[in-house]
Image (cartoon, rainbow, N blue to C red):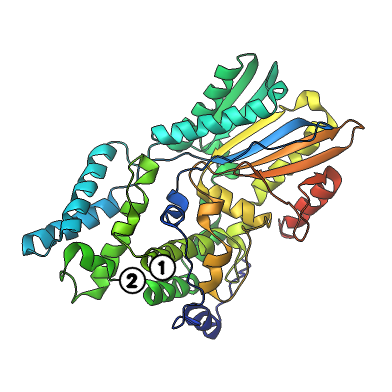
Amino acid sequence: MIHRFITILAVISAAVFSAHSADPTLTTWSWQQCQGSFMPYVPPAAPVVIPDSLKVVMINHVGRHGARFPSSSKSCTKLRKALTEARDKGTLTAEGRRLLAITDLVIARAEGRWGALDSLGQAEQRGIAARMLRRSPYMFHDSHVNAISSYSPRCIMSMDEFTHQLARLDNRQEIYTSSGRQNSRLVRFFDLSPEFTEFTESSSLATVEEAYTSATIPLSPLKKIVGSYLSDNPEEAAKVVTAEWAVLTGLGAMGISVDGTRYFTPEEMNRLWSIANLKHYLKRAASTLSTIPADIASPLLQDLIDSFDAFIADSTKVDPVQLRFGHAETLMPLLSLMRLRGCYYLTTYFDTVGKHWCDFDIVPMAANLQMLLLRSESGHLYLLTLLNEKPMPLIPNDNSVFIPWSRAREYLNRCLPLTY
């Protein structure tokens, strides 16, 4: 088995600890942005403008499920235990009592629905579907839509909400949907790679994550909620701060509004966000530790290329609208493999990642990649790439968004690893 791990401990140490004393790499993202991959979807400010001389002839869409309830009760349980123990010891603050009430509310609302798509997530998918149809209504009228999803219920429901909205807006279309493990090769490939599993369990990854977390995590937020409780136990305090962060940043995705600045200073929340962001980056994108997290998306990228090729060869045999519903873990590797701007960043200085690779820009709830094949009046084919419904230059160092298909195809094929 070929390993592409860089495990030079001197480099890792320098990467983790460089310039922390002066904090030149500390970000100043807002509370909304610091919700990271839990951040609810922000619709585009303006519709995509396609010149009249170009007509959409095929759509390839890869989407993440919409906003959801917390995936499990683990963080809530951990935080609630600390808060109730502080209450029993008489150190719980007024903000701590408020946070305990919020935690109880989350547990009550999510009971029996942990990880499920919520009403906000449903609305996100309907909105994306509506904008897609209204941009090119002729693509759906008397046409065919093929949609697949992973076996995850929140992905299936995202697909159902999306396709149901398409049908509501125009019922003159045939929609075929499929969900289950037969689709894992395209939307849950991260479950199928022994090399990827080995990397996620490797000491090289653990060394970087643990060192960065230890050097970065602030314990000061705890004093605001539990007073002196856990002041003599920094290891446990770090676990509780992590749980507090997970609970509070997940509230927006389940429709509960909270001002995170009540619990964290701007520096504290940016440090906590950077820890979660770095973990996403290292596990789900190409890095100097390994390219495997991106390479595993090769079957999906190949499928996107092949579907365009098949449509161009004979449009009567290929559904012109192809929808795929997966996870953040589906999109992050794919976008990194494609080297899309803001989605691909290589460095040995991991404390700079938060300035160049931001999960809230890449995979908010309901994140999506749309690739539109367009035909000009003269018959030439072009590709327009949209990330979260915003035009995105496909080729590095080139700001063009309308790329001749032949050039786009050549570039996308070059993104595939030689071993694939």
Residue at the (65%, 36%) spot, across then down:
47
Q: On screen, 308 above or below 274?
A: above
Q: Position of residue 165 (x, y in %)?
A: 54, 23
User: Which amino acid type is marked by label 1?
Assistant: Arg
Q: Which residue occupies the foreground of this view, 51 or 8?
A: 51
Q: CA distance from mark 2 to mark 1?
A: 7 Å
Q: Position of residue 250 (x, y in %)?
A: 36, 49
Residue contact at pointers 2 and 1, CB within 8 angstroms:
yes
Q: Which labelled disc corresponds to residue 123?
A: none
Q: Is residue 179 left or right of residue 62?
A: left
Q: Which residue occupies the foreground of this view, 339 or 198?
A: 339
Q: On screen, 321 above or below 359?
A: above
User: Which amino acid type is marked by label 2?
Assistant: Pro
Can residue 324 be seen here? yes
Q: Which labelled disc corresponds to residue 271?
A: 1
Q: Which residue is tagged 2?
A: 218
